[in-house]
Structure formats: C-alpha cells, structure tokens
Amino acid sequence: MDSLFQASATTWAAIVGSGVFHGVNPAMGWLFATALGMQRGSRAAVLMALPPIALGHAAAILLFTTSAAALGSWPSLSTALPLHLLLGALLIGWAVYQHLYGHRHRVRVGMTAGFAGLAAWSAVMATLHGAGLMLMPVVLPLCGASGTASAAGLLVPLQFTVAHTVVTLVTTGAIALVAYEYLGLGVLRRGWINFDWLWCGALATTGAVLIASG
C-alpha cells in the first residue's frame, strides 16, 4: 500500500472512530482547554489551547506508528517474536497497570502553561494512557504492507497520524467549546462517565483483538 488514502473503508472507520474516542476522553485535552478558557474568561483561550494539545497528541501517536513501521520491516524479528502477540499482551498488561496504578501518575500542568508546556503535557498524557498502543491493530497491517522503514515506508504512518490527529482535534475542540459556552464544568458533578474504566476496557479489548487476529 503506497498511501493511506488507498486504505479500505474499515481502516478509515477505525481511524475516525479512534480519533473521536481519543477526542472525547477528557484526559486527552478538552477538559484542560475548557478549564483554561473559564479561568481566563475567554473563548480565545480555549481555541489557543487546542493546537499545542493536538501537536503533543500527534507526537505521541507518531512515535508508535513509526515504531510499528520499523519493527514490521524486520522479518527475522516478526518470525522469532510475532508482533501481534507481543503488542496484544502489552496492551492487556498496560490496561491492567492503568486500572491499578494509573491514578498515581497524573501529570499536572498549571493554568499558566505556554504552548510548549501544553504540547509536552499532551504528549506525555497520550503516551502514558497508551493512546498509540491502542492504534496498533490498524497500524500494523498498513505498515507491514510497505515492508520497509525507509522514508517512503514511513509515509503511511505519517499520513495515519495526521488523519487521526485531525479527527481528534475536531472532536476535542467541539466538546471544549460546547462545555465552555453551554455546559460548564458543573456537568462533571451532575453526570459523568468513568473514562478511566472505559479506557482500560478499550485497551484490553484492543489487545485481545490483536492477539486473535494473528
């Protein structure tokens, strides 16, 4: 496969679906952007927080997608240690770790954080939550088709990261603005989904699917 844009409808559905799921998760940034806007009393503050949050998320996703491309280009490694088993077990293990100990490793950033601080916070949060690992079932077949870790072979992971990040950014921005303009953070007290449980469940399910797909 020479381009992500030749991918199947199922692949695109996975890209869009994962982008929406990541965008809805408050840990990926919309909650921070909304709180920042309310603290400063400015819609512009909400909007200004979105680019660095998206950039940090993209950096975390790109780290995993390019790693998958590099690993997929080593046939000897794939033969000796099937990647789908390794990554599937890693996802399930990470889900268990997040459930037991994830609450102890929250990354806190003050309301005065600048562009670089927000981007770094976003990258760390996405990495610690395993956002990139969750995308492995979709990324591995695409990267495996390229069969090389050259610049051309890394084009698909880059395209994947851009497409996924755009969907995540749109979702994050929409929720942040709705929360800022209409709902306020009081909605967290009136009704709330436990995203930590949902996220851990998604990681474990993805790992099981990855193992079963081999």
Image (tube, rainbow, N blue to C red):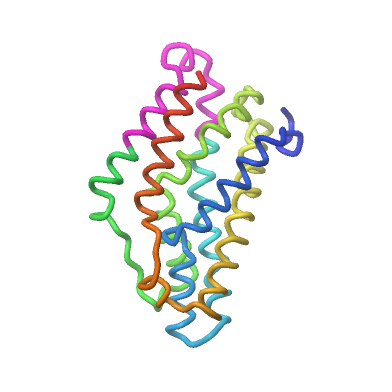
Q: Is residue 126 above or below residue 93?
A: below
Image location (x, y in percent) of residue 19: 57, 50
- Residue at 53%, 15% (x, y): give it: 75
Q: Is residue 165 above or below residue 81?
A: below
Q: Which residue is nearer to you in this view: 190 or 70?
A: 190
By secondary structure, the bulk of the magenta-drawn segment is best described as helix
User: Residue most toward the right?
Assistant: 6
Image location (x, y in percent) of residue 151: 65, 34
Image location (x, y in percent) of residue 129: 39, 49
User: Residue most toward the front?
Assistant: 190
Task: Determine if the magenta segment contains residue 132.
Answer: no
Task: Determine if the magenta segment contains residue 75.
Answer: yes
In this rendering, the count of numbered labels is 0
Q: Quadrant of residue 112?
A: bottom left
Magenta stretch in the rendered image: 67-93
- Residue at 56%, 74% (x, y): give it: 178
Q: Is residue 67 left or right of residue 199?
A: right
- Residue at 23%, 45% (x, y): give it: 100
Q: Quadrant of residue 203?
A: top left
Image quarter in which the N terminus is found: top right
Q: Is residue 93 left or right of residue 25?
A: left
User: Residue most toward the bottom?
Assistant: 41
- Residue at 42%, 76% (x, y): give it: 185
Q: Quadrant of residue 51?
A: bottom right
Q: Is residue 185 above or below residue 204?
A: below
Q: Is residue 195 left or right of residue 9?
A: left
Image location (x, y in percent) of residue 148: 62, 24
Q: Is residue 177 above or below residue 156?
A: below
Q: Which residue is nearer to you in this view: 7 or 74?
A: 7
